[in-house]
Image (spheres, rainbow, N blue to C red):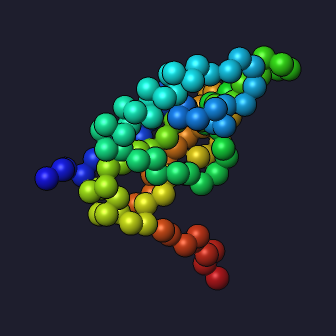
Amino acid sequence: MYMPWVVCEDFNEITHAEEKLGWVERDATQMRDFRECLSRCGLLDLGFVGQRHTWCNCRLGEQRTLIRLDRGVANEAWRKMFLEASVHHLAMSASNHCMIVLYLKRTSPKRPAK
């Protein structure tokens, strides 16, 4: 039996070329190896809500690069325990990475008190 497992972090790699915008193309072999590693570990991408890319190299012009390096992944046992879980990408001005937040349940926005 598999233990529930979730990982949210900067993997410093992407799974597909569409997760990168700008400058030099990512090595297809590296992306394939990362996908295979996730698969061998039984980890599936949890998707995301918010901005598409989680890292920027802070350069201007043709060398500007945006990439989805940060993600949440989990195995099937964990996903069954937290059916409503979602990963949110939140913009941050103090870092070249955005913050990723894992919500375990869907929540409604708080309404101001009357």
Is 113 drawn above or below residue 87 in the view shown?
below
Q: Please state which of residues 14 and 27 is positioned toward the viewer in this rendering.
A: 27
Residue 43 is situated, as x and y percent measured from the top left of the image, at 36, 44
For this orientation, the residue located farthest to the right is 61
**In the displayed structure, would residue 45 be above or below residue 54?**
below
Q: Quadrant of residue 58?
A: top right
Work out whether 62 lies above or below 11: above
| Residue 87 in the figure: left or right of residue 22 | left
- Percent across and percent down for residue 2 are 18, 50
Q: Dividing the image into 4 quarters, which one contains the C terminus?
A: bottom right
Q: Nearer the viewer, residue 88 or 68?
A: 68
Camera-side residue: 33 or 14? 33
Residue that appears at 64% across and 32% down: 17
Residue at horizontal 29 percent and vertical 63 percent from the top: 81
Q: Please provide percent x and percent y for residue 72.
A: 45, 44
Judge from the rendering whether residue 15 lies leftward or rightward of residue 34; answer left or right.
right
Q: Is residue 32 visible?
A: yes
User: Is residue 94 visible to us here?
Assistant: no
Lateral position of residue 50 relative to residue 88, left or right: right
Identify the residue at the far left of this view.
1
Q: What residue is shown at x 43% (from left), y 66% (from top)?
A: 84
Residue found 61% across the figure and 46% down from its top: 90
The residue at the far bottom in this view is: 114
Q: How many marks?
A: 0
